[in-house]
Image (tube, grey):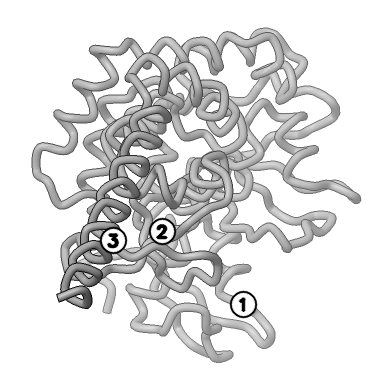
Amino acid sequence: MRQVLYSVKYYRFNLIFFISSIFLHWASIAQNSFTLTNYIESYKEIAMDEMRNTGIPASIKLGQGILESGFGNSDLALVANNHFGIKCHGWTGRTFYKDDDHVNECFRAYDDPRQSFTDHSEFLTGRSRYAFLFELDILDYKAWAKGLSKAGYATNPRYPQLLIGVIERNQLYEFDQQVVSGDNFFAERNQNSSLMNRRKININSQSDFSSVGLGRNVMENNRIHYILAKQGDTPKSIARDTGVWEWEIYRYNELEKSDVIKEGQIVYLQPKRRNAKQNWHVVQEGETMYEISQKYGVKQKFLYRRNSIPEATDPKPGTRLKLRWSLFNK
């Protein structure tokens, strides 16, 4: 009998301890929970910094954070500091497992929420399916929202409407305006005021670059403006001299962070195209697909697809490379 009473007391103690632990856990979460206003105030500066660095509108980043994390109150955000629901996909850092589309899926976990915001930027800038977004007007949050959905960012067909609704109800577009109208935003990219004002009106306008100064001679190839690199040029120095963003130099010229720009190299100031003016190119000894892409102003992916060549490989010398799609290319 004494043994039974002891077991009952032990069971009650453990039950009370378990319930108390759960209560304290949720009390702690409730204490740290965000209101919507709270969330915006906490992360708006990070979103604007990322906009300056990568060209992703602050309104889009904040809006996605609000939707994906329940403005910071989801278990993924509270425990793993993951505000955008980014899954592991080759991630080597800390992880967090939870049910999503499938049971017990792997999500990235961060030491600090800021890491989640920067990783979200890398996620969008580092995947080719999102590349077209960076050719949109940076102030057109509606086009960005629809573009994200088109690129397959979310499975919910109403995602663009939800994202646009969050942005407009909370006037998140004002943060985009703050960044674009900032004193240093365009000044860092060009000292010529007429070019700065023109690009403020439409960040992706196909305007000419006649006002580019500092000894830069702007030329045109395949209806794309470009310059020839000088000795010691970097994407940053070219961006400063020509009034475009540093990330645009990388993206338009399909450069990696580790690439070195050589003297005399073609550097495009606008996106390359699908087709060249010419129909064909015969590959010379030692010529790379990248060099051909730059020579004719055509994106590499179209050259690879059009010629059924595996990506990241160079065509063999003597190959007759198709530069444009035409029913009459025989």
Is the residue under label 2 in contact with that under label 1 (CB below 8 Å)? no
Q: Which residue carries the number 2 mark?
A: 128
State the residue in front, 244 or 266: 244
Residue linked to disc 1: 288
Instruction: In this rendered view, identify the residue nearer to me: 157 or 91.
Output: 91
Residue 317 picture location, percent across and down: 58, 90
> In the displayed structure, does residue 140 sit left or right of residue 191?
left
Q: Nearer the viewer, mark 1 or mark 2?
A: 2
Q: Amino acid at mark 1?
A: Thr
Residue located at (42% from left, 30% from top): 32
The circle on residue 37 is none
Mark 3 = which residue? 14
Residue furthest to the front in view is 1
The Cα atoms of the two marked residues, 3 and 1, are separated by: 69 Å
Residue at 59%, 59% in the rendered image: 294
- Is disc 1 placed on a helix, strand or loop? loop
